Amino acid sequence: MATIRTETQGRVAIIRLDRPQALNALNRAVAEEIAEAAEGFDRDPDIGCIVVTGSDKAFAAGADIKEMQPAEFRDMIRENWFATWDRFTAIRIPTIAAVNGYALGGGCELAMMCDIILAGDKARFGQPEIRLGVMPGMGGTQRLTRLVGRSKAMELCLTGRMMDAAEAERSGLVARVFPAADLEAEAIAMAAEIAERSRLVTMMLKETVHRADEVSLSEGMRFERRLFHAMFALEDQKEGMAAYIEKREPRFRRD
Ligand code: CO8
């Protein structure tokens, strides 16, 4: 892989953006490599959670402006730019973004494609596309609005200003903030804990939470209830509840 590095630690996979010369700007090769790596981990029963991270300076400073600048409308349409990212959001096991440094434009949007965003205390988030004569194109107008509400999403997208980790946590974009030096270890520890649970149940839980963005409350409740009922067809429900009653650790299935 030319633009990312991957490794595994136990049941956790780590995808690390690795274009330091461009502050991890997301070009088409990055999208393809992240999608391919994540799909591989998603198929691997030995992996239960993926951490996506960058460097101390930048998670990712946006889509690659130098690659995009000469593109024409016909190129965008023909190649359906940014559609590759749909493969990443289709990953069924949980994903955690561990953000140190800049998460701007497409970088902020990649973080929002993940299920949980954790930030180092020096992280900066923003959607500066307006300053480049465009608007967010990898989900920023939609996911940021759902996460922080319309007024704040409008303010961030229309001004292009950056917000710090504390503000991002206050506004609901970020789940938790850690000292920058501890972020990666904390993210991996959280991922390891998630990866110890029933792999099938974490997948169904992820699908159900994301359903909340798509359907009405009553439809979402019906979907949740039906999948909850379905979980009683899994050995993991029997094992998890028996382990609680017997005061021991559960042993969930991995496949
Ligand atoms: N694309 C390409 N190269 C980049 C990017 C980027 N997004 N960000 C940084 N780089 C490059 C710089 O050009 C520089 O390269 P060089 O040394 O060759 O000049 C190198 O990375 C280091 O960057 P800086 O010297 O600028 O580092 P600083 O510490 O001075 O500044 C900043 C850091 C503030 C992050 C600054 O680099 C910056 O403002 N970057 C651009 C941020 C930005 O605007 N991102 C949004 C991009 S657009 C997008 O993501 C969504 C696209 C959706 C559009 C839809 C179209 C269809």
Image (spheres, rainbow, N blue to C red):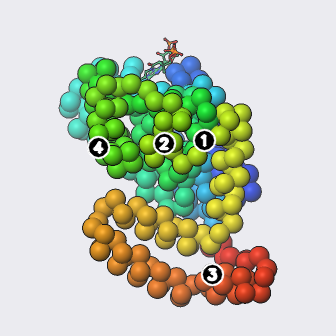
Q: Nearer the viewer, mark 1 or mark 2?
A: 2
**As shown in the figure, which amino acid type bears the numbered disc 2?**
Arg
Provide the secondary structure element on which disc 4 rests. helix
**Of the residues shown, which amino acid type is indicated by label 1?**
Val
Task: Determine whether the beta carbon of the residue marked 4 sits less than 8 angstroms from the nearest atom of ligand 1.
Answer: no
10 Å neighbourhood of mark 2: few (<14), some, or many (≥20)?
few
Classify 10 Å Cα crowding around label 3: few (below 14), some (14-19), many (20 and above): many
Q: Relative to residue 211, is residue 80 depicted above or below? A: above
Few, some or many residues within 10 Å of mark 1 (<14, 14–19, 20+): many
Can the viewer see residue 13 in this picture? yes
The residue tagged 3 is 236
Residue 177 - label = 1
Q: Position of residue 241 (x, y in %)?
A: 66, 84
Amino acid type, mark 3:
Asp
List x then y, in percent, for residue 229: 46, 85
Looking at marks 3 and 4 on the same chain, the residue that comes earlier in the sequence is marked by 4
**Location of residue 123 with respect to 9 vertically, above or below:** above
Label 1 or label 3, whichever comes before in sequence order = 1
Quadrant hosting ligand 1: top left
